[in-house]
């Protein structure tokens, strides 16, 4: 992309949107991104904000009726070069994110997203649309936030990934670590909620859908083409009344023949056994290096904003 005056629009100004706005402003100078600006923000709660000032977050006020905002029309008319899609995740039909992404790609914008719904359900279609329109579609934040995950393979030209496995959901890993330590399931879940790891409705985490989405995304990225509905998903509820709860991890796995998420009992010789608390990890089985493992945060305000910043720098080509 040409480096003169790049405009970035943010859709969805919640945890990730605000985290990205702050991280971008704080790192802009050190990354020599003076020619890049956040030109507009669209959010159902905060409305349509054009040319936001750096101190925007301390002055944020909800608008009267944000639901009347026509986000697709704003994308259509926007002169932004890059659209950052950070709205609500939806594993049923990917909306509203998938429509935002389609509209952005077909009206001349590159897209960065952390939204797993549209990517787990429609990655192949969206990537084709991006290619057809000569645009970039960057999705680092959909798997392990800013922690290098599938993108480490960019450092290993020619290396072939035979399979990928990992711990892709911090909330369930935290709960399983507490079960391993002797805590009961409901208490461990409450603790995860009180620490802000689990939502009030923990279904997406506990029933494995969030991890399943990441497995579907990895399968698509490595050309194995399993979408969300092809991933066999089992969450961690079966361990609730089980007496044997030591050493379990919610493992996501994909190769060219299979894609699943299920609780697996690991032994101490397995590196993933040692990944505890909310930490995520990914392990690639490669033809040139054998097993390569990366561990780190999989969610959080700054952690996910880092993913979008990585994608932004990647697109701009610094
Ligand atoms: N937080 C994390 O650690 C994390 C990590 C990885 C990936 N992600 C993904 O990143 C995305 C954003 O996450 P988040 O934690 O920032 O969520 P969030 O705090 O709930 O923020 C989402 C924002 O988008 C707004 N929104 C919803 N529908 C919209 C629409 N149609 N048009 C414009 N704005 C809309 C919401 O407004 P209302 O509140 O009024 O609905 C809210 O302000 C999600 O897809 C999430 O799964 C998050």
Image (tube, grey):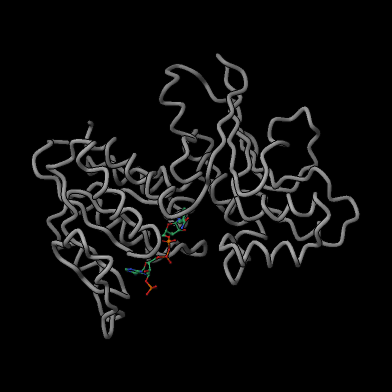
Vertical side of 132 occupied by 159: above or below: above
54 displayed left or right of 160 = left
**Residue 126 appears in the picture as rendered:** yes
Which residue is at the front of the view, 188 or 166? 188
User: Residue at 13% of width from left, 61% of height from top?
Assistant: 51
Which residue is at the front of the view, 191 or 138? 191
Q: Quadrant of ligand 1?
A: bottom left
**Residue 295 rendering spot, x and y as whole percentages:** 57, 36
**Residue 112 rendering spot, x and y as whole percentages:** 32, 48
Seen from this angle, which residue lies furthest top? 288
Q: Quadrant of residue 43?
A: bottom left
Seen from this angle, which residue lies furthest bottom? 64
The quadrant of the picture occupied by the N terminus is: top left
User: Residue at 57% of width from left, 16% of height from top?
Assistant: 289
User: Residue at 31% of width from left, 80% of height from top?
Assistant: 67
**Residue 201 rendering spot, x and y as whole percentages:** 60, 71
User: Residue at 55% of width from left, 14% of height from top?
Assistant: 288
29 displayed left or right of 237 = left
The quadrant of the picture occupied by the C terminus is: top left
**Residue 230 appears in the picture as rendered:** no
Vertical side of 217 occupied by 183: above or below: below
**Residue 131 rendering spot, x and y as whole percentages:** 28, 40
Seen from this angle, which residue lies furthest left? 4
């Amino acid at each position: 992309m040409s480096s003169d005056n790049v405009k970035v629009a943010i859709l969805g100004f919640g945890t990730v949107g605000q985290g990205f706005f702050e991280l971008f402003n704080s790192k802009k100078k050190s990354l020599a991104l003076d020619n890049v600006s956040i030109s507009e923000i669209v959010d159902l709660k905060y409305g349509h904000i054009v040319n936001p000032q750096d101190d925007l977050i301390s002055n944020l006020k909800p608008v009267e009726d944000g639901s009347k905002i026509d986000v697709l029309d704003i994308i259509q008319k926007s002169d932004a070069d890059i659209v950052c899609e950070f709205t609500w995740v939806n594993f049923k039909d990917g909306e509203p994110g998938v429509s935002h992404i389609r509209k952005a790609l077909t009206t001349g914008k590159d897209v960065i997203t952390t939204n797993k719904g549209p990517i787990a359900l429609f990655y192949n279609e969206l990537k084709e649309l991006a290619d057809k329109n000569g645009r970039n579609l960057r999705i680092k934040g959909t798997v392990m936030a800013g922690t290098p995950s599938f993108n480490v393979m960019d450092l290993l030209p020619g290396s072939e990934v035979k399979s990928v496995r990992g711990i892709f959901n911090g909330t369930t890993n935290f709960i399983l670590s507490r079960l391993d330590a002797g805590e009961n399931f409901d208490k461990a879940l409450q603790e995860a909620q009180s620490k802000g790891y689990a939502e009030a409705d923990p279904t997406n985490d506990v029933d494995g859908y969030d991890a399943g989405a990441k497995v579907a995304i990895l399968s698509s990225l490595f050309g194995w083409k399993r979408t969300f509905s092809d991933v066999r998903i089992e969450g961690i509820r079966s361990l609730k009344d089980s007496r044997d709860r030591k050493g379990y991890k919610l493992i996501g796995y994909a190769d060219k023949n299979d894609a699943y998420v299920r609780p697996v009992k690991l032994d101490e010789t397995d590196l993933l056994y040692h990944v505890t608390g909310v930490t995520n990890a990914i392990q690639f089985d490669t033809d040139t290096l054998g097993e390569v493992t990366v561990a780190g945060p999989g969610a959080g305000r700054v952690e996910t904003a880092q993913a979008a910043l990585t994608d932004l720098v990647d697109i701009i080509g610094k």
